[in-house]
């Protein structure tokens, strides 16, 4: 009886085991091929292609054998640092090219502004403190309208020029008696602070030579000063013209003629400021002449926050399993250690590249008009015209520091080994 019961129990266990095994087999073979299986095969193919490209461009049929080379660690470190500096310099150059391209794209938005001299002075400075005995001071208001979206945009000065007309030269008063050409060096300063007429701080902006025998117009670069005024209007304390070795008023004046028919004409700007010390509107309106000092500047509105440069994963890049089946750029990383090349490739330690993959439906990331026409023709004649393919349309170089067959250090650059952009073509 017990024996029969044991046999019955054993039979049930065998049946249960068979059932479980059958179900496991069903589960195993009913699973679809996982995407990572195909992904792994693609990666292997990319690695083979990468290795072949590197060796072919070096002219090698196999990697260099450096087992017999005596390696100098200090020299290797020096070369790696040199490689890092080279890469940093190239990255900085690329960033500059991107910024220059942005500037070119924004050039059409530049606006010309003109700031006219009115004979005034900063509101916070008294007439006595404003007047300087040995120099000529100029004050320009910066009446720029409030920027729209001021929290995210700024007014950037591309260039700014101060133009003044020098007049009434007195070369006989020049202290430099050895100046045969009668030249006077005039420096332009930005006034940073004023305590009184003799106690103030300034910063030089530009310097030019004036021919006292034929003075004419002088032009100074003032972009740095005007930008600081726009950024902080309270910092606008004016400009100052001064001679290098003597009182500028002794040898030359700046033309600033009243438009009034009266006989009151004051050419020296220092005297004009003293005469118009009350800052009255009527007095300012009287100074309006083509010879008056003026500032012409080009400025443009631009984004205050710069775009992020070269993030690890760029916007628009894809990853396997994210559901994107259309043409896209996918990252690939190949370690030189993993492929057994770290003995002869010193830097970098890995190749960070990309490849293009995906379908090209109509009107999606077309490289040009022809690609769009090709997509239409493929839809009409699928057996005759192939569809557009997802291809690399922009490439950048890849550089390595390595040993050659003779055991010498080499920098080798591959112009088109890093995919920057994928499109349908």
Image: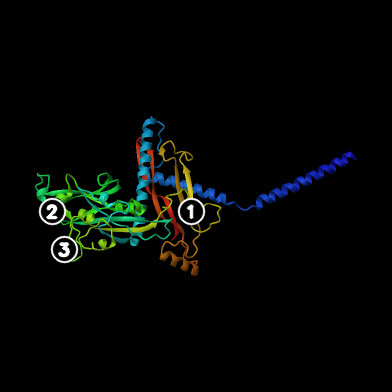
Mark 2 lies on a secondary structure that is: loop
Q: CA distance from mark 3 to mark 2?
A: 21 Å
Check the picture and name the quadrant holding the N terminus. Answer: top right
Residue 360 position, x and y percent, is 49, 61
Of residue 321 and residue 146, the one placed in the foreground of this image is 146
Check the picture and name the quadrant holding the C terminus. Answer: bottom left
Q: Residue under circle 1?
A: 317
Q: Is residue 154 left or right of residue 23?
A: left
**Given the current orientation, which residue lies at the most extreme bottom position?**
380
Quick check: marks 1 and 2 in contact, CB under 8 Å? no
Residue 321 position, x and y percent, is 56, 53
In this picture the colour scheme is rainbow
Residue 336 higher or lower than 95, as above or below: above
Which quarter of the figure has residue 244? top left
Q: CA distance from mark 1 to mark 2?
A: 67 Å
* Mark toward the start of the polypeptide (1 vs 2): 2
- Numbered circle sitting on residue 386: none
* Mark toward the start of the polypeptide (1 vs 3): 3
How packed mark 1 is, by other alpha carbons closer than 10 Å (few <14, some 14-19, many 20 or more), is some
Of residue 343 and residue 14, the one placed in the foreground of this image is 343
Of residue 66 and residue 165, the one placed in the foreground of this image is 165
- Numbered circle sitting on residue 169: 2
Q: Can you see residue 69?
A: no
Q: Can you see residue 395?
A: yes
Labels 1, 3: front one: 3
Q: CA distance from mark 1 to mark 3?
A: 74 Å
Q: Which residue is at a point 25% across and 50% down the rendered structure image?
A: 128
Labels 3, 2: front one: 3
Residue 275 position, x and y percent, is 22, 56
Mark 3 lies on a secondary structure that is: loop
- Numbered circle sitting on residue 263: 3
């Amino acid at each position: 009886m017990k024996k029969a019961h044991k046999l019955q129990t054993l039979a049930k266990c065998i049946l249960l085991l068979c059932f479980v095994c059958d179900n496991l087999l069903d589960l195993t073979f009913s699973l679809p091929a996982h995407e990572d299986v195909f992904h792994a095969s693609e990666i292997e193919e990319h690695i083979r292609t990468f290795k072949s490209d590197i060796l072919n461009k070096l002219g090698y049929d196999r990697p260099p054998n450096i087992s017999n080379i005596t390696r100098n660690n200090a020299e290797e470190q020096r070369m790696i640092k040199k490689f890092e500096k080279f890469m940093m310099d190239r990255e900085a150059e690329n960033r500059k090219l991107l910024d220059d391209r942005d500037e070119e794209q924004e050039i059409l938005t530049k606006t010309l502004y003109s700031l006219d001299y009115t004979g005034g002075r900063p509101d916070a400075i008294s007439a006595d403190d404003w007047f300087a005995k040995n120099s000529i001071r100029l004050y320009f208001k910066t009446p720029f309208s409030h920027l729209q979206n001021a929290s995210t945009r700024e007014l950037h000065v591309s260039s700014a020029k101060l133009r003044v007309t020098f007049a009434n030269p007195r070369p006989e008063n020049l202290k430099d008696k050895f100046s045969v050409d009668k030249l006077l060096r005039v420096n332009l300063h930005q006034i940073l602070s004023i305590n009184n007429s003799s106690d103030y701080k300034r910063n030089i902006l530009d310097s030019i030579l004036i021919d006292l025998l034929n003075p004419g117009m002088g032009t100074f670069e003032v972009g740095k000063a005007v930008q600081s005024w726009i950024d902080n209007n309270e910092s606008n304390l004016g400009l100052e013209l001064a001679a290098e070795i003597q009182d500028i008023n002794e040898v030359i004046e700046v033309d600033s003629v009243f438009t009034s028919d009266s006989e009151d004409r004051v050419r020296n700007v220092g005297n004009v400021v003293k005469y118009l010390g009350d800052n009255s509107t009527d007095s300012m309106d009287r100074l309006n002449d083509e010879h008056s000092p003026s500032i012409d500047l080009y400025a443009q509105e631009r984004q205050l926050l710069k775009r992020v440069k070269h993030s690890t994963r760029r916007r628009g890049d894809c990853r396997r399993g994210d559901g994107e089946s259309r043409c896209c750029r996918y990252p690939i990383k190949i370690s030189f250690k993993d492929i057994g090349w770290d003995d002869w490739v010193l830097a970098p330690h890995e190749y960070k590249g990309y490849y293009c993959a995906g379908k090209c439906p109509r009107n999606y990331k077309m490289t040009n008009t022809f690609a769009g026409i090709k997509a239409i023709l493929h839809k009409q004649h699928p057996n005759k015209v192939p569809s557009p393919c997802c291809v690399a349309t922009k490439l950048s170089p890849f550089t390595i520091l390595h040993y050659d067959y003779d055991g010498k250090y080499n920098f080798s650059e591959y112009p088109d080994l890093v995919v920057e952009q994928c499109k349908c073509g």
